[in-house]
Amino acid sequence: MMTDELFREDATLRECAAQVIAAEEGGVILDRTVFYPQGGGQAGDSGVLRAADGAAFEIIDTRKSKLHAGGVLHVLAAGTAAPPVGTAVAARIDAARRDAHRRLHTATHLLCALVPHPVDGCSITRDYARLDFHMSEPLDKDTLNAGLARLVAEAHAVRHRWISEAELDAQPQLVRSMSVQPPRGLGRVRVLEIEGVDLQPCGGTHVSNTRDVGAVRVTKIEKKSAMTRRVVLGFAEDNDNATASRP
Ligand SMILES: [Zn+2]
């Protein structure tokens, strides 16, 4: 019940043709998908599955299937009947939500380059991203924002490639995160490189050049414990408008 994960090779895909291959509590598994399942700190995609007869099935979240190894579970809105196994669908993500995830996710890599300490927690959502750094020194918001703005303006290329687990084991410094270890046992690991800035294992969705991160900045720095500094990132346009209080 493996799902072909098209978003791993191309994070800009919005839609694909697919077929329902299994149903499970709350959702369906497709043979291929553009929907990113929650993982590595990044939230899952939402969107819609549309059958040839026009029937639409709203997808409110995406998870890794617990029942079918390698399957991506498309979570249906409450009360929505699942399309039957065998149904051909057009699977389309909420593009604005994905673009927010791509920008904020890439910004967390830039932050990792600016703060040379291990990460022990990470969350990337539609509206904000937060990273917990294992460190006791204080962090300065203005310094981090100047660093982010510089890395965005420098327009570094962002690309992924696959390396063998043996190559990864030979470079333990590649693993920046203490809590989110790269998935093992597949023989290969996806690494994300921001040219000249950052290199680490990551399976998430990113922009293809740091200039596309755009106006993202640090909105809050918190001391969560003696050894944890939490940095929260948000979109500058949101904060300029003060539309809502962000966590
Ligand atoms: Zn990443």
Image (cartoon, rainbow, N blue to C red):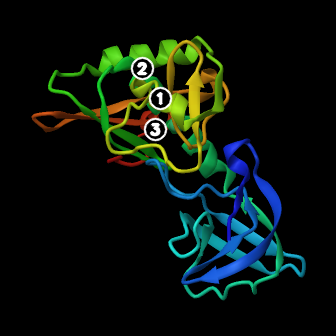
> Residue 179 lies in what quarter of the image?
top left
**Disc 3 CB within 8 Å of nearest ligand 1 atom:** no
Which mark is nearer the camera, 3 or 2?
2
**Where is 155 relative to 3, above or below?**
above
- Residue drawn at (32%, 48%), measured in percent from left and top? 247
- Disc 2 marks which amino acid? Ala
Disc number placed over residue 109 in the picture, else none? 1
Q: Viewer-proximal residue, 235 or 205? A: 205
In the image, residue 146 lies at what x, y percent?
41, 14
> Residue 157 lies in what quarter of the image?
top right
Q: Viewer-proximal residue, 17 or 8? A: 8
Can residue 111 be seen here? The reply is no
Q: Mark 3 points at which residue?
A: 241
- Disc 3 marks which amino acid? Asn
In the image, residue 109 lies at what x, y percent?
47, 29
Query: How many numbered badges does the structure rendering display?
Result: 3
Q: Mark 2 points at which residue?
A: 113
Q: Describe the element under mark 2 as helix, strand or loop.
A: helix
**Where is 48 relative to 200, above or below?**
below
- Residue drawn at (32%, 14%), measured in percent from left and top? 143
Instruction: Identify the residue at the far left of this view.
Output: 226
**Where is 34 relative to 237, above or below?**
below
- Residue drawn at (59%, 35%), measured in percent from left and top? 164
Q: Viewer-proximal residue, 160 or 214? A: 160
Can residue 217 be seen here? The reply is yes
Q: Do the residues labelled 1 and 2 touch (CB within 8 Å)?
A: yes
Which mark is nearer the camera, 3 or 1?
1
**Disc 1 CB within 8 Å of nearest ligand 1 atom:** yes
- Disc 1 marks which amino acid? His
Local packing at callout 3 (Cα closer than 10 Å; few below 14, some 14-19, many 20+) is few
Local packing at callout 1 (Cα closer than 10 Å; few below 14, some 14-19, many 20+) is many
Q: How far apart are marks 1 and 2 (CA)?
A: 6 Å
